[in-house]
Each structure stands twice: as C-alpha cells, then as structure tokens.
Amino acid sequence: MYLPIELGDQLRRDGCGEPQAVARGLYDLEGNLGESYVVAGDHWLMLFSKRVGQPFTSRRLGMEEIDELVIQDDRAFLHLQIQAAGQKFHLKFSTWDRVDLDKIAALWSEHSGRLAVDGEAPIQTTAPPATSSPELDPLTAFCASVH
C-alpha cells in the first residue's frame, strides 16, 4: 500500500524505521469524512488520521500496548478494531485491504503471542423492524406469483 510522503517523513523523524505493512482506511478515526492509515513496524503500530481539510494527526502504539486486535468482515467492508491502553479505535477498510490487514494482524500476533480475532461483522440495517406481515389482495398475490 502507498504511504503519503509526509507520513513516511514523519515515521523517519520519529525513528520508527521502515514500515512492514500499511493499510488505508476510508474515514478518519472518529468516522468522519476523511482518511486514515494503519502502519505497522516490528514493535510498533502507528495510526494516522485526517479529517477532510485538516492536517494528519498521529498516534503511536507499542505492540505490547495493544490488548486486542479484531478484523471483521461485513461482505462490503472490513473493520479493524484495536483496543489499547483503555481506548478503542475502529477503522473501516475496503475488502481490497485484506492482505495488508492480515500482515498487520500477523505482526501483532508474532510480537504479542496472541491471535487476532477474525470474524464476521453483524449486519446492520436502517430499515425499521416489521411489526406484522402486510395483507395481500388476490390480484397482487397472483401477479407476484406469476412474476
């Protein structure tokens, strides 16, 4: 995955070294319109977040600080949930980022000795729950069965 030049420069200034895996999120860390990056190195994970029109903010986590790492698949998107130092981070990715997220999970598992959780996200719908089935008149039932 491509990492913007300014973020690569910040990693070098912070003495992080070369990243081993990079994934680009679809929104910022708060779920607003923007972008985010998860960058993993040997013993660290860096979260970059940028709301549209704002500069990037960053959060560096040591692999030992991360308590839980969960990758969830909801068919259309991937969700990465990171729990570290009493905080939860939730990032949304395209399914094309699966390989990069698996690399990040493998790096964390290798360092922490724990396995990343991999599962299916619950399907969320905005439709109101149906209270009762609608009554069909005979003509509508006939047309539906023919169609």
Image (cartoon, rainbow, N blue to C red):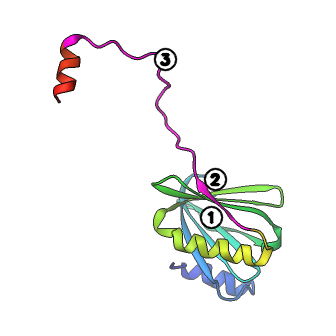
Of labels 2 and 3, the one closer to you: 3
Q: What kind of element bears circle 1? A: strand
Q: Is residue 89 above or below residue 16?
A: above
Q: Compare residues 46 and 13 and report the one nearer the observer.
A: 46
Side (left or right) of 122 relative to 40: left
Residue type indicated by callout 3: Thr
Residue displayed at 78% across by 56% down: 87
Name the quadrant containing residue 72.
bottom right
62 drawn magenta: no
Residue identified by numbered label 1: 49
Residue displayed at 45% across by 15% down: 132
* Residue 130 pos. (x, y %): 47, 22
Specify few, some or many for label 3: CA neighbours under 10 Å numbering under 14, 14-19, or 20 or more. Answer: few
Mark 1 / mark 3, whichever is N-terminal? 1
Residues under numbered marks 1 and 3 in contact, where contact means CB atoms less than 8 Å apart: no
Residue identified by numbered label 2: 30
Q: Compare residues 44 and 6 and report the one nearer the observer.
A: 44
Residue displayed at 77% across by 69% down: 114
* Residue 141 pos. (x, y %): 23, 18
Residue type indicated by callout 1: Ser
Residue displayed at 18% across by 19% down: 142
**Magenta: predominant secondary structure element?**
loop
Of labels 1 and 3, the one closer to you: 3
Mark 2 / mark 3, whichever is N-terminal? 2
Side (left or right) of 27 relative to 40: left
Q: Compare residues 54 and 28 and report the one nearer the observer.
A: 28
Q: Which residues are magenta?
A: 115-138
Residue identified by numbered label 3: 131
Q: What kind of element bears circle 3? A: loop
Q: What kind of element bears circle 2? A: loop
